[in-house]
Image (cartoon, grey):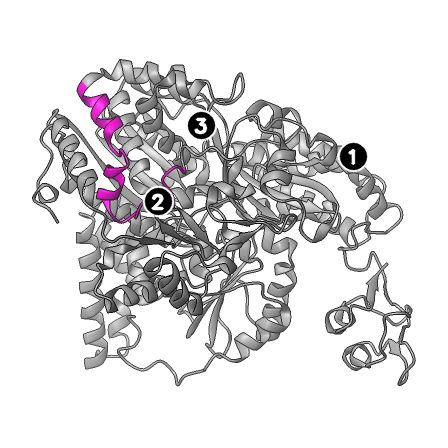
Amino acid sequence: MNRWFAAGQETRRAREKRMADETLVEEIVRRYDGEIGMLIPMMQDLQTACGYLAVDQLKRLAEKLEVPLSRLYAVATFYSSFRLAPKGQHEVTLCVGTVCHLKGAGAISEMIREAFKVEAGGTTPDGLFSFQPVNCVGACALAPVMIVNGKYYDGVSKDSVLKILHGLPLAEPAVKGEGNK
Amino acid sequence: MTVAACKRFSAPADLERFRDELRRRPPAAARTVRVCIGTGCTARGSHKVYELFTQALKEVGAKAEAAKCVGCHGFCERGPIVVVQPGDILYQRVEEPDVAEIFRETIMGGRVVERLLYEDPATKARARTSAEIPFYKAQQRIVLAHNGEIDPKRIEDYVAVGGYSALAKALATMTPEEVLSEVEKSGLRGRGGGGFPTGRKWRSCREAPGEPKYVICNGDEGDPGAFMDRSVMEGNPHSVIEGMIIGAYAVGSRQGYLYVRNEYPLAVEHLKLAIAQAREFGLLGEDILGTGFEFDIRINRGGGAFVCGESTALMASLEGRPGEPRAKYVHTVEHGLWDKPSNLNNVETWANVPAILNNGSGWFAAIGTAKSKGTKVFSLVGEVVNTGLIEVPMGMTLRQIIFDIGGGVKGGKAFKGVQTGGPSGGCIPAQFLDAPVDFDELTRLGSMMGSGGMIVMSEDTCMVNVARYFTHFLMDESCGKCTPCREGLAQMLAILDRITHGEGQPGDIDQLRKMAGLLEGAALCALGKTAANPVMSTLRYFRQEYDAHIIEKRCPAKQCRGLFRYEISVERCKACGLCRKHCPAEAISGAKKTPHVIDQQKCTRCGMCLEKCPFDSVLKV
């Protein structure tokens, strides 16, 4: 908690945010009766609400559940669906399952990483999109498949992927109230 | 909603009465239409197609229920699939503009739209119903029987086709012991990979000391190229739930868990809804069907870790911990979730249970081979003409599956092999195409059944690269708990990387074999123990490809960069200059009207010329 007071006084906005965060975490813990076995669902709900797992919220969750923060960190880093940094404005998922791989998804993944300076599981420096290569989305008839914000693109190639990704609109830095979608 | 729909069933007879009532109900319209909302069809826009149908129905004043969303039909290659009843008319590749025509011609006029029917590529004959399509002809559907027929969001649909009758039968007329022995006699084996006899597992759990006991459904279908379980969970969620309740009754459990893969949001949605409906109808929760039996199910979403398909890792995940497996000499049926007796089965296994109780163990045991009973769902993918989901009796040959049902290799290429069993399975070459597919035969061939992925590979697939891909996959997904798996796979991958880059050395294969033996003997869980399978099975059947890479520095399938050359065909080149313009190494020369040439000294083998050539004149040699 000390962090909040480090600068002397907590600003009104920071205070409001802290209260909102606290209610959110409390709400989620209550949803599962505080049962530690439901830790993963709790963290999934937290991530759904905020887009990622913020350190402050994880600390709060650990406090509420009376477990060390390291336990939450272990879970967050073990499972690939958790992210500890904010996500980009768009979500780009590339299937690199066996069939997609046979049809060239590996080279496409490599190209995206190079062209947009983005790591697997990371976000582009300009915050345009988060890039997640996944093992299989089970749409093998459409291979290679890329999913952008839930929309499936089938039979993609390096060229078509570039066209799709360059066409993504880059909005102004996140506006207040838009984050919880 | 009818009166019956709002109240709980307090006796098995209530369920039967409700079923009779549902069956007597007149259909919503003279002709109804079913739109597939499986993943493949959805990705191609079937939701929009469904919306357009409901809109059209509304405009003519028909009931909206005349259009129905149904689960995967299996024929993903030809999606979106639309079926009109009566007549079972199957339309394929239906796009938005086609809806108006189907509505006008078939639904209103009763005429068939010929151009949307499936056309046999060989005979050019058009098939009107699914039964006439070769893809469906050889299949036998038990688990997928009602997929594509019922609306997965409506419990009424499931009840109308006989749903929950097996549960009623078990609770009202059978003791848990009788249920157990029925499943034992059926010869059902686990569909998740191991093929362990289901009945024996149930009995061990029942007899294990300790309370409470747990029943778990493994829906963490992580094998790339496999989507059988997903289609069952999405398309017929109640069948899984019914199987679990019956299992709980036999084992003596009151709490069940459904562990569903994170990448399957639709499956979670449908299962959640199905559980809520089952509770509402008194089929889950306290006093099920008024018999005093109590059982409930909770859904957990996976976190995106392949290793959680392993039973002990899955249980660790259910306890809210990282999914690390533990040694299996302590059996999970005795010490599983929260250290209590736990019975875990795969989605498809559970979905088989109602059919076994309904039709009897004798009926089930009559299907399949001596030691593998019943049917198996496979996802037939890769370089095959008819990609999709199929269900066939055990013992069908690979040739029947790949050529009769699958339509052979895409583009008329030669068949090289089929990869079965997921990442830790193996590749089976053409000489074993006539092998019957069952648990033991696949194991004998150095592969395994796994959960049922079948990836067809053509002559253009480099088997060393395939082995490298799976090794990379498994290294990524290794939880890191035991050293042989964590370090061994990394070392094996390093060797395979070298080989595919043309830097292989003569001792590499021995080294791979040595490490494979180590993994098999010393790794902690099934993931590690079988992780060398892709390498070992490709070494067994495609040794010459490894040798070509290592000794001749040549990739026979022309897939590994640097191990083949690009050349421009003098006959085909139109001298358009596109390749020359795009070549990053300036290795291509040529003037107007003269075929272009690649300078092999300058060429970096990037493949840009091949991608850019509009006339397919760049060849791999």
Whether pointer 1 and pointer 3 mark residues with C-beta atoms closer than 8 Å, the reply is: no
Closer to the observer: label 2 or label 1?
2
Horizontal and vertical percent position of residue B479: 50, 43
Counting residues from the start of the chain, the first of labels 1 and 3 encountered is: 3
Which sits earlier in the primary sequence, circle 3 or circle 2?
A: 2
- Please indicate, yes or no, whether residue B599 appears anywhere in the rendered image: yes
Q: Locate residue A5, reporting x and y percent.
A: 24, 74
Specify the quadrant that holds the C terminus of chain A: bottom left
* Gap between marks 1 and 3 measured at Cα: 35 Å
The local crowd at label 3, few if under 14, some if 14 to 19, many if 20 or more residues have their Cα within 10 Å, is many
User: Mark 2 falls within which chain?
Assistant: B
Residue at the disc numbered 1: B510
Within-10-Å neighbours for mark 2: few <14, some 14–19, many 20+: many
Start-end of magenta stretch: B144-172
Residue identifier under label 3 = B190
Q: Residue at x 14, y 42 (%)?
A: B280
Question: Looking at the image, which is closer to me, A61 or B45?
Answer: B45
Q: Position of residue B46 (x, y in %)?
A: 41, 61
